[in-house]
Image (cartoon, grey):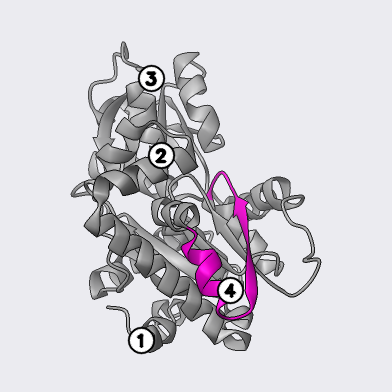
């Protein structure tokens, strides 16, 4: 636990070091996304980002990642400009001194994080996780959820053996009994269920406000405010399309993500895609900061409001 920030940086270096190439000509905006980035996937499929950035004389490069921590490293190194992550990576990144800003909410799903066990597991309650191996991408929102879940049931993180695994490897680790449980996020959770490789033991409903956020590198935002606003306009176009035609949107997201349509349909039905940031969202990220402090990995104290710059959203006229 004390090496959380170092692990984030290490994961980032391994996963993101070869993911970028220098632009050949003109302005190029690097967008980082992952399987959970449903609206970016939709906007990509519909061409909204390409269209909005073209209005500003820029091209888009899409960079796919397995999780949020490597994208934070991408921001830090100037190789990414705009990204989508869960709540843990930006707080950990800011605590490590990375100059980044939350610019909008990326979708609220009450059951976004879950702990799953094998279908035939003898584990019936989170209390039964004591002494067990739990696979989780360290530094992710699921890692924080695992901490909160254990705490609710009177356990500490030290009561389980945390196994740091990339999200795509969790289903196999559960199926082969290399771990007793896994903690992860959607759409991976529902995909594990559909494949019958695991069942949900507990999800984040009533335990954690699972906030997803859009971020920019602060230097990039200050130098290119119009490009940040273009990103938000394209994102809003995607959310509007989803509202008008959910079935077509779900099909486009499924095709782009390669996740089954049944998975995408299930999870997007729960989502609130509003881009505005509420006081509850800010409090949720403050809770993440408390977690880092409690586990003694908060390298640098900061006021949680320093993490946000909602001026781009305001200038875009998006509510």
Q: Distance between the residues labelled 4 and 1?
A: 22 Å
Camera-side mark, 2 or 1:
2
Residue 103 visible in the shown view: no
Camera-side mark, 4 or 3:
4
Report the disc number at residue 195.
3
* Tag 2 and tag 4, C-beta contact below 8 Å: no
Residue in view at x 51 percent, y 36 percent: 167
Residue 307, above or below 4: below
* Residue at image mark 2: 254
Q: Residues within 10 Å of mark 2 (few under 14, many from 20)?
A: many
Q: Nearer the viewer, residue 274 or 290?
A: 274
SS under mark 1: helix
54 magenta-colored: yes
* Residue at image mark 4: 54
* Residue at image mark 1: 314
Residue 93 visible in the shown view: yes
The stretch in magenta equals: 47-67
Q: Distance between the residues labelled 2 and 1?
A: 31 Å
Q: Residues within 10 Å of mark 1 (few under 14, many from 20)?
A: few
């Amino acid at each position: 636990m004390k090496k959380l920030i170092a692990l984030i940086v290490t994961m980032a270096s391994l996963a993101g070091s070869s993911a970028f190439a220098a632009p050949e000509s003109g302005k190029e905006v690097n967008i980082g996304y992952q399987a959970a980035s449903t609206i970016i996937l939709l906007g990509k499929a519909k061409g909204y980002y390409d269209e909005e950035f073209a209005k500003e004389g820029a091209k888009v490069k899409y960079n796919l990642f397995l999780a949020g921590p490597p994208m934070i490293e991408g921001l830090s190194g100037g190789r990414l400009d705009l990204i989508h992550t869960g709540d843990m990576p930006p707080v950990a990144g800011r605590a490590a001194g990375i100059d980044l800003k939350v610019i909008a909410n990326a979708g609220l799903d009450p059951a976004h994080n879950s702990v799953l066990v094998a279908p035939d597991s003898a584990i019936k309650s989170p209390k039964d996780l004591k002494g067990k191996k739990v696979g989780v991408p360290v530094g992710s929102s699921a890692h924080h959820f695992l901490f909160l879940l254990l705490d609710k049931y009177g356990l500490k993180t030290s009561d389980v053996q945390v196994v740091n695994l990339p999200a795509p490897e969790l289903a196999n680790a559960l199926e082969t009994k290399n771990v007793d449980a896994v903690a992860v996020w959607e759409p991976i959770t529902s995909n594990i269920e559909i494949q019958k490789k695991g069942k949900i033991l507990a999800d984040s409903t009533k335990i954690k406000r699972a906030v997803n956020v859009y971020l920019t590198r602060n230097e990039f935002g200050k130098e290119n405010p119009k490009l940040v606003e273009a990103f938000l306009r394209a994102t809003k176009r995607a959310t509007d399309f989803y509202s008008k035609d959910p079935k077509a949107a779900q099909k486009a997201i499924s095709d782009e993500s390669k996740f089954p349509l049944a998975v995408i349909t299930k999870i997007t039905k729960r989502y609130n895609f509003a881009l505005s940031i509420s006081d509850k969202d800010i409090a949720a990220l403050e809770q993440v900061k408390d977690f880092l402090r409690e586990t003694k990995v908060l390298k640098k104290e900061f006021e949680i409001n320093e993490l946000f710059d909602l001026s781009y959203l305001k200038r875009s006229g998006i509510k």
